Image (tube, rainbow, N blue to C red):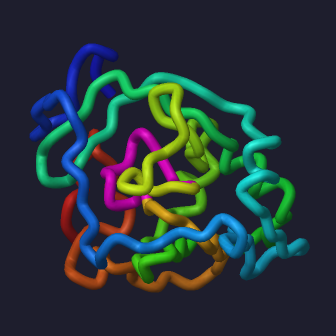
Amino acid sequence: MSSPDSLPPGQKAISNFIIYRILGQPEVSLSSWRLRIVGDVSKSLTYTYDDLLKMIDTSYISDFHCVTGWSVRNVMWEGVSLRRITIEAQPSKNVEWVYVRSLDKYTTIIPYEDFINERSLLVLRINGKPLSLEQGFPARIFIPHLYGWKSAKWVTEILFTKEYKDGYWEALGYHHRGNVWKEERFK
């Protein structure tokens, strides 16, 4: 990795996020929205938005990188450590992948080792404010060293699994991991 002031290869800084809603803009009802943690785990879990707000344990500043070549610098991310959620669910020793489903039916798959990275986050606030609907309210994934397509918005289910299964963009040829510093854009 380069110095904190440099961008990954092939990236250009822009001032604001470009908002993608490839499968449309879902409607969110907080009274019915739940985040389910399932799969090859000892303990399936279900969280409400209020549950997650009470669990906020992580905040830091990091850049966001889109696979299309743009980056937004110095974003403040705040939420619940994905490692903490993983520890609570107690996945089996042979889990290798984490499959993420969203309210809009978007899916992505994340290598387990990246998912439990100390900076991997279930984001509830961005730049000091609750996520906007366009940014994935009520909760989204953020893993700083992976391209943005791994940062699923409107997350409703996290499934721990031994088996690889393509998510939305992976089925269209995108890389299974998506490390920005290694330019892992395509398979």
Farthest residue, direction right: 42
Foreground residue among 166 and 104: 104
**At 28% across and 45% down in the image, what residue appears?**
180
Instruction: Determine if residue 96 is in view.
Output: no
Q: Give residue 94's position: percent from left, percent from top.
A: 72, 73
**At 83% across and 70% down in the image, what residue appears?**
45
- Locate residue 162 relative to residue 179 in the image: left or right: right
Image quadrant where residue 95 sits: bottom right
Would residue 149 be counted in the magenta stretch? yes
Foreground residue among 146 and 32: 32
Quarter holding the C terminus? bottom left
Q: Give residue 61's position: percent from left, percent from top.
A: 46, 23
Would residue 43 be counted in the magenta stretch? no
**Where is 167 relative to 155, above or below?**
below
Q: Which residues are magenta?
A: 139-151
Q: Give residue 38's position: percent from left, percent from top.
A: 74, 78
**At 21% across and 27% down in the image, what residue appears?**
7
- Locate residue 88 relative to residue 76 in the image: left or right: right
